[in-house]
């Protein structure tokens, strides 16, 4: 049989099993591995990029009083592309609710993936929705795909335990007295702190250039940590100013210390070198929190002068 329809079907069948060639490399049979590893719908774009997706229609989301349809921006996805070194690169975006952020991030790190941004896409949204952008580069597309599945499985596990996103952690409230073992915290952080009411703050300046001028801490380019609580219990929140190669080490160090990452984005455009900013929050004994912050500072090549 050699009818036009037969020939067309033969071509389609060949495309489904043939390697997908992309400048400098090919995903090849990994297409099927991605499908099996993720158990997610797979599409192949005209440029050879393989994409998987998951619409977050499991939690109703209201934006400005209107129920938002999932296709209007509540989609998680991951894209795989062969690169010239023979490996595969991953980019993606995952919808997360507040109680899903840390489990999803820990799953990503456990599988060697990078978190490249964490921020909101909406305002007036209930429950609040965040978007965790991911990246990776491996020789195996299957390994990357298993990492994406681990992230999505971690999210599903949270929703299985609580169908509705919870609004706070399980930690009990405590009194903010403003009384701290300041000398101990100064020693751990190797910095001078400043007390403003009940808040003890430490600042670590960075430096960059923009418009032909040097600038630093006074223009907002700094890492800082603010402690609120008492000698026994406190919360710490703040920013980390990081160059590109410092982002992942800082994030790993904070998570290893049990400190939550709540945002990752830029604050400026056009500075040299480019800086990224990470916002964090943790709760526990002040000294333990300080050691966590210090461990993240120690991953940076040039954490800057302390003030």
Image: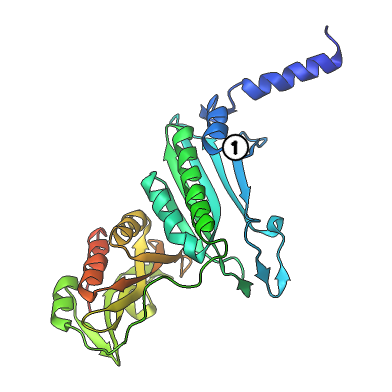
Residue 70 appears left or right of 30: right
Vertical arrangement, residue 159 with respect to residue 63, above or below: above
In-front residue for pair 283/210? 283
Q: Nearer the viewer, residue 271 or 148?
A: 148
Q: Nearer the viewer, residue 91 or 33?
A: 33
Q: Residue furthest bottom?
A: 197
Residue 14: image quadrant is: top right
Displayed quadrant of residue 257: bottom left
Q: Is residue 208 above or below residue 227?
A: above
Q: Nearer the viewer, residue 139 or 229?
A: 229
How many numbered markers are drawn?
1
Q: Quadrant of the N terminus?
A: top right
Q: Residue furthest front?
A: 161
Residue 304 visible, this angle:
no
Secondary structure under tag 1 reads loop
Q: Is residue 32 above or below residue 175?
A: above
Where is residue 136? Give x, y as percent.
44, 44
Q: In the rendered image, which residue does mark 1 sit on? A: 49
Q: Please rate how many residues cluster around mark 1, counting C-alpha atoms within 10 Å: few if below 14, some from 14 to 19, many from 20.
A: some
**Colour scheme:** rainbow
- Residue most toward the top? 1
Residue 176: percent from left, percent from top: 31, 87
Q: Position of residue 42 (x, y in %)?
A: 63, 37
Q: Is residue 163 visible?
A: yes
Report whether 54 appears left or right of 270. right
**Residue drawn at 57 percent across, 28 percent down:** 32
Task: Quadrant for the C terminus, please.
Answer: bottom left
Which residue is drawn at the image coordinates 57% and 69% (left, top)? 128
Residue 237 falls in image quadrant: bottom left
């Amino acid at each position: 049989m050699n009818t036009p329809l037969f020939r067309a079907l033969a071509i389609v069948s060949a495309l489904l099993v043939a390697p997908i060639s992309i400048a400098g490399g090919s995903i090849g049979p990994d297409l099927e591995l991605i499908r099996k590893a993720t158990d997610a719908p797979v599409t192949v774009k005209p440029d050879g990029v393989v994409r998987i997706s998951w619409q977050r229609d499991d939690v109703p989301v209201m934006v400005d009083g209107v129920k938002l349809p999932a296709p209007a921006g509540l989609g998680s996805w991951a894209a795989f592309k062969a690169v010239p070194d023979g490996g595969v690169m991953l980019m993606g975006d995952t919808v997360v609710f507040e109680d899903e952020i840390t489990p999803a991030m820990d799953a990503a790190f456990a599988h060697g993936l990078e978190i490249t941004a964490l921020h909101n896409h909406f305002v007036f949204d209930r429950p609040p929705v965040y978007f965790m952008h991911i990246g990776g580069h491996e020789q195996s597309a299957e390994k990357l795909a298993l990492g994406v599945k681990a992230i999505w499985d971690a999210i599903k596990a949270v929703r299985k335990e609580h169908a509705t996103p919870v609004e706070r952690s399980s930690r009990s409230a405590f009194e903010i007295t403003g009384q701290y073992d300041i000398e101990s915290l100064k020693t751990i952080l190797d910095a001078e702190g400043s007390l403003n009411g009940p808040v003890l703050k430490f600042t670590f300046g960075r430096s960059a250039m923009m418009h032909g001028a040097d600038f630093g801490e006074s223009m907002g380019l700094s890492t800082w940590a603010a402690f609120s609580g008492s000698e026994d219990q406190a919360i710490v929140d703040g920013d980390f100013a990081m160059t590109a190669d410092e982002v992942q080490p800082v994030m790993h160090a904070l998570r290893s210390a049990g400190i939550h990452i709540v945002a990752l984005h830029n604050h400026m455009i056009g500075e040299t070198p480019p800086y990224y900013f990470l916002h964090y929050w943790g709760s526990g004994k002040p000294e333990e929190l300080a050691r966590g912050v210090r461990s993240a500072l120690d991953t940076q090549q040039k954490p800057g002068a302390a003030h």
